Image (cartoon, rainbow, N blue to C red):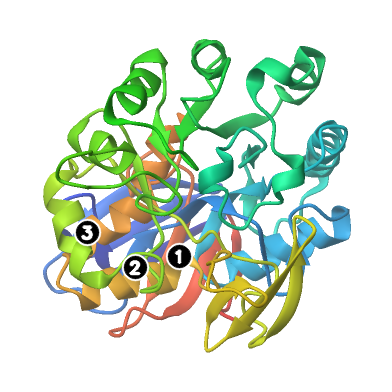
Amino acid sequence: MREVVAGRLVLVDAVVPGRVVVADGRIAAIEPDDAVDGPFVAPGFIDVHVHGWGGHDATGDADALSGMARALLRHGVTSFLPTAPTLAADELPRFADRVRSWMPVAPADGAEPLGFNLEGPFIAPARKGAHDPALLRTPADLDPAIIDRVLDGLRIMTIAPELPGSLALIARLAGLGIAPSIGHSQATLEEARAGFAAGGRTTTHLFNAMSGADHRAPGLAVAALADDNAYAELIADGFHVHPALWPIITRTKPPDRLVLVSDALPLAGKGDGFTRVGGLDVEVRGGRATLRGTETLAGSTIALDSAVRNLVREGIALPRAVAAAASNPAELLGAQDRGRIEVGRVAHLVLLDEDLRVRRVLRGDVWVKPA
């Protein structure tokens, strides 16, 4: 198949009118042309931290994973990592097996799975957030054979660096090309820096469920912001991190190190109601998800198209916002075949209107309309 997609091309550092020539599912040519008008054409978004969407749970069966993938694609997410919350130790390999078995038959009209993400169980009890405390473990007290069984397909894993055995596990995962994510942590500044030095590549939902920016006792949030090599996730829903902090984050982190994530719940896109995540009851009211009966945030109800719109609404340039949803997560995962509008990369494209709402999405040679 060969076709031409015309509009305002959102490149890594500029918006350029022109055309993208697509052939056999890849970008064959880019033709700048000042006379071209039309929708914004952005690279497909990549959500590396998402627990579900549209009523479908990432820890469910193949049908649930397919439903989740289809729902995400209609919001411009062309690639993703199904993400598990903290699970019982014996359930971790079963989750990994389900995702691995499903990936070869994942639907062409859904977001493409690139592996999976484990947000637990190696998180600090004091910063557990919406994770079941009964299931938490340290790397030192979990049977190493369980870790061995989840390595194939594992792309990101959250680890609190202050826990016994964490630094050795961080170093091992990093050596295997897996991205350790420092998060759900009560780490001191020194402990957080040790986690990044051991091989920590990224930071699980910056500012949330972590030691912060106390002026006399800085913790993980400061270590993540001050380390130019560390990626940092941001949930840009307006609940997890106040929008007044977003420009501070973008001024602090290098342009290629901010990663937008949804941290979306299975109930995302379904309105208010109740659900269960990791065995815990969650309530959604007015788009805000909390553990039932508490004020503890329990994930979001947005997709990355909303996150991009929200950043731009707060004055962050469109190319910077799109890079945080596309090229930066691609680089984090080492997925050099996607994330940018460049010749040779896969033709994963999102057409956005003037209000940055999704009009159409191209995944290779499949077009889909928005939700």
Quadrant of the image for the C terminus?
bottom right
Residue at x-position 80% and y-position 21%: 146
Q: Which mark is residue 308?
A: 2
* Residue 306 % position (x, y): 42, 74
3 or 1: tag closer to the N-terminus: 1
In contact (CB < 8 Å): disc 1 and disc 2: yes
Q: Which mark is residue 304?
A: 1
Query: Disc 2 versus disc 3: distance between alpha carbons?
Result: 10 Å
Query: Disc 1 versus disc 2: distance between alpha carbons?
Result: 6 Å
- The quadrant holding residue 70 is bottom right
Can residue 17 be seen here? no
Q: Secondary structure at mark 2?
A: helix
- The quadrant holding residue 108 is bottom right
* Residue 126 % position (x, y): 52, 45
Q: Amino acid at mark 2?
A: Val
Q: Which mark is residue 319?
A: 3
* Residue 363 % position (x, y): 56, 57
Can residue 92 be seen here? yes
Q: Secondary structure at mark 1?
A: helix
* Residue 18 % position (x, y): 23, 64
Compare residues 304 and 253 and report the one nearer the observer: 253
Q: Amino acid at mark 3?
A: Pro
Callout in the foreground (3, 1): 1
